[in-house]
Image (cartoon, rainbow, N blue to C red):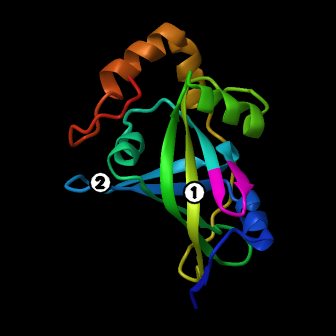
Amino acid sequence: MARRFPRIEEAHRAFIARQHIFFAASAAPGARVNLSPREAAALRVLGPDAVCWLDRTGSGAETAAHLAADGRLTLMFCAFAGPPMILRLYGRGESLKRGSAAYAALLAEAFGSEEVPGARQIVRLAVDLVQTSCGYGVPLFEHVGERRTLEDWARRKGEQGLAAYRAEKNARSLDGLPTGLA
């Protein structure tokens, strides 16, 4: 039932566009595997072999630490409504730090230079394999809406508060790996 593709095809792009959530999985040698839900509205398909998402400040920064240490990254999308399917994007990721020239260029290109409150990095994935599978076991869920909690929290913190938070909470991974975000 699983099929492999060397690149993101139009049907994959259309499937990704219909999703409200995706999951990012990363790991580094000797470190815990991390799996995080992400808001699909923050993701952009850059072409047949690349995607990115505008990442917000959160309670941890495992993905950034794992990308710095190893680079492996997998994104998974599940159809929670409509016809069943699971789509995975495999490849090597990189963290573009907020304030860097690479971040600014991709922010302009993919996000119209608009940052969301709490933005801390853009994660870019160079896709080397796309895999689809049936998704028959994925339950149906109804999307009710997006949560505003993280955006409201980031606005209340302000730039200085976010910088202090990242320095305290986002400098190292659970396993002590540096994230490069503080």
Q: Quadrant of residue 84?
A: bottom right
Q: Quadrant of residue 112?
A: top right
Question: Does residue 131 lie above or below 66 as drawn?
Answer: below
Taking the image as shown, residue 175 lies to the left or right of residue 111, namely left
Residue span colored magenta:
44-51
Q: 69 or 52: which is nearer to us?
A: 69
Q: Name the chief secondary structure element in magenta.
A: strand
Q: 22 or 92: which is nearer to us?
A: 92
Q: Estimate the spatial distance between the alpha carbons at disc 1 and disc 2, rounded to whole Å.
A: 17 Å
Q: Nearer the viewer, mark 1 or mark 2?
A: 1
Question: Does residue 2 lie above or below 152 as drawn?
Answer: below
Q: Are marks 1 and 2 in contact (CB under 8 Å)?
A: no
Identity of the residue drawn at 19% across and 55% down: 30
Kindly identify which numbered label has been placed on residue 126.
Answer: 1
Q: Secondary structure under badge 2?
A: loop
| Crowd rating for badge 1 (residues with CA inside 10 Å; few <14, some 14–19, many 20+) | many
- Amino acid type at mark 2: Ala
Tag 2 residue:
28
Q: Name the image quarter holding the N terminus.
A: bottom right
Identity of the residue drawn at 64% across and 53% down: 51
